Image: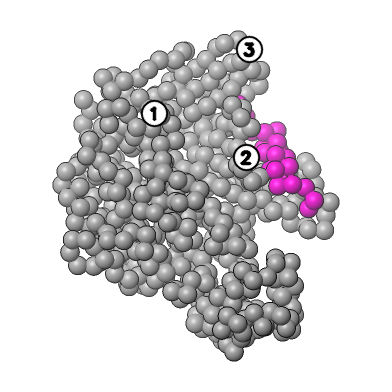
Amino acid sequence: MPTITERRTLMGHENESSLSVVNRQSKHSKLFAEQVCEQFLDSIRRRVPYVPDQGHGFYISNGARIYPEVGGHPEWASPECSNPRDLAAYDQSCERLMLAGAQWLREDEGIEVDVTRHCIGVVTPNSITFSQHESYLSWTSRWFDFRQLLPHMVSRTIYAGAGCLSSDPNGCGFELSQRTRHLTKSVSDDTQSNRGIVCSRLRKATDRCPRGTWARLHQISKDSQRSPDAHYLTCGSTALVIHGLRIASFCKVIERLTIQDPVASIRDVSRNPLLQFKIPLKHGPSLTALEMQRILCDACARFVDRGDGPDWAPHLVNYWRTTLNLLDTNPLFLAPSHDAYLRWQIFNQQIRRAGATWRRVHLALRIVDQLRRAQPRHNLSKAIEAIERGKTLPDEMLVQLREAGFADQFDPLDLQLVMRLKAVDLDLHRIGGLYDQLRKAGTVSWSVIDENDVQRAMVEPPIDTRAAPRGQLIKQLANEPGWRCNWDGFYNDQTGSSHTLSDPFQLQAGPHGGTLTDESHLYDIPF
């Protein structure tokens, strides 16, 4: 049997993007979201080698899949990666392709769209949510339990979020994570309503081997992050913790970190950007998320130092420790490299410039939330327009605020500020927007990947997973009729020919199907 070190972990992600027509007065503003999305994907198909999947999506030559998601927005699934550095590069390659797709759509159809990667609804943030789904293919021990992931998934919020404005009455006006308010269970297999901090959903029958060895863990609690450094740390630390759960001594550390109420704790961690909230544990004194992350990092370092970790683990551990040290000194030291703290820093600057305070901004956010719940959307739009023009609210809205206890505290200037902050927030999510402008200006920095990595990831697949033969076959078969592709291989409807990619680690495509077993020391489940 392979050793613990040889049992590598693969990782991948799914990115949800949204498309919005820029000119609301143009004829294209009348198009349905599904129509815009389909034309957007058609513009990409015309310019990149691809093989269609079994539905309405397609696979491209870097091994990734692009497809329309329910609601009329494009989604990207990365190729299988063997390390978090590659995964961060492919995440950025997704952004570049989405930005190119918007340009091609304008050239082809005259439709100008913005592409954004946000995690909550712009108008109704408390009821609409998106995320960046993570997948980890890993050997798991017989004693593996989904609940073992909770200490890490709760405490990683301090670097796994994108940051956001928040009207939560128990908060301060800012949260580290956009996703946490939508997590209602500790562990759940539901990905649309009763979402869990840890997702136990088995997307395929093969996601869990009958003998309990290989499993694909599909997680939905991560924010969509623009920063490759934040993405690298979030996915890399999670993959390393999953790797550690094969080791008995590491599992004992996890057991000592069992959290009393994970759902309440992850929300409190998110609501406290100063990182001072202490998480109540079942066994022992309460710990801050930062203290819990230090314990997990040190526990991972111990088995990595013994040589029991993957080859990328030493760099990840060093980066993890450096990040925690910076957070301990001043969380805003992470502003150049992590989304949440960049947002917090920009909002701080805007609030100081306006002569306001977070207390006043928080109150204004609660008033906006109250107006949204009480008013039809078109009436709220009129109210916002009136505020932006320096006018007061209509009388009926003032009555509603008075009934909710807000009328005496209402300040139109604070509401104007909140609208500006929300516009800045959305522009940071927009691909080609403020985040990218800050990177060109040197305010945002990358340290784990560079431009060459991104350019390579746009056209080439990872070299050490089955994405490599997939990408090679797509280049060969893109112009041949009848071929279709899925994660497990290729088949031709017309000729009956096929190429099998059922082992996620295989580097050459097989000519026909077959079952891979544990006895072959290969991997018997698709990624």
| Residue found at x 74% / y 56% | 22
Residue lying furthest top in this view? 495
Disc 3/disc 2 C-alpha distance (Å):
25 Å
Indicate the quadrant containing the N terminus: top left, top right, bottom left or bottom right. Answer: top left
Crowding at mark 3 (Cα within 10 Å: few <14, some 14-19, many 20+):
few
Residue 161 visible to an observer of this rendering = no
Give the labeled residue for mark 3. 494
Give the labeled residue for mark 2. 68
Q: Nearer the viewer, residue 442 or 75?
A: 75
Q: Position of residue 265 (x, y in %)?
A: 34, 64
- Label 1 or label 2, whichever lies nearer to me, is 1
The magenta-colored residue range is 29-51
Disc 1/disc 2 C-alpha distance (Å):
25 Å
Give the labeled residue for mark 1. 206
- Residue 35 on the magenta segment: yes
Q: Nearer the viewer, residue 351 or 54?
A: 54
Disc 1/disc 3 C-alpha distance (Å):
28 Å
- Residue 387 on the magenta segment: no
Name above or below for residue 466 compared with residue 245: above
Q: Are the two marked residues, 3 and 2, in contact with CB atoms closer than 8 angstroms?
A: no
Pick whichever of labels 3 and 2 is earlier in the sequence: 2
Element at badge 2? strand
| Residue found at x 61% / y 54% | 116
| Residue found at x 66% / y 17% | 481
Name above or below for residue 377 compared with residue 458: below
Q: Position of residue 414 (x, y in %)?
A: 61, 82
Element at badge 1? helix
Mark 2: amino acid? Pro
Residue 74 position by quadrant: top right
Mark 1: amino acid? Thr
Predominant SS along the magenta part: helix
